[in-house]
């Protein structure tokens, strides 16, 4: 089970490094994954710090 957690974290890290858009920059991306018991459930907490280059309502 731990092996799958490491693969998941590595995949998220790989894709987050290449996130780019013209109107914003991702300055920081923190993720905390907690495995809950032996059922294979997990809880994910993400914190994203974004700097906008122009006024916007959010990002997708």
Image: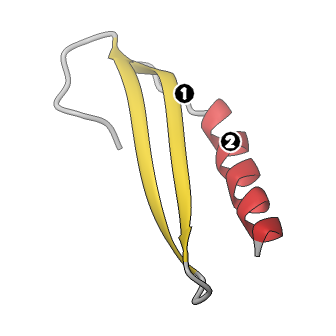
> Image quarter for residue 51?
top left
First in sequence, mark 2 or 1: give its number: 2
For marks 2 and 1, give the one nearer the viewer: 2
Gap in Å between the C-alphas at discs 2 and 1? 14 Å
**Residue 33 position (above or below residue 3):** above
Name the residue that disc number 2 marks. Answer: 13
Q: Which mark is residue 20?
A: 1
Q: Residues within 10 Å of mark 1 (few under 14, many from 20)?
A: few
Q: Nearer the viewer, residue 27 or 42?
A: 42
**Quadrant that contains the N terminus:** bottom right
Furthest toward the front, the residue is 37
Please name the residue shown 19% across and 16% down the image.
Answer: 55
> Image quarter for residue 58?
top left
Q: Position of residue 20 (x, y in %)?
A: 54, 27
Q: Nearer the viewer, residue 2 or 26?
A: 2
Furthest toward the right, the residue is 3
**Residue 14 position (above or below residue 5):** above
Residue 23 makes an appearance in the image = no
Please name the residue shown 69% across and 52% down the image.
Answer: 9
Q: Position of residue 25 (x, y in %)?
A: 46, 19
**Quadrant that contains the C terminus:** top left
Please name the residue shown 66% across and 31% down the image.
Answer: 17
């Amino acid at each position: 089970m731990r092996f799958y957690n490491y693969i998941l974290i590595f995949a998220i890290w790989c894709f987050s490094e290449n996130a780019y858009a013209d109107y914003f920059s991702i300055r920081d991306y923190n993720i905390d994954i907690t495995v809950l018991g032996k059922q294979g459930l997990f809880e994910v907490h993400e914190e994203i710090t974004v700097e906008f280059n122009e006024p916007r309502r959010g990002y997708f």
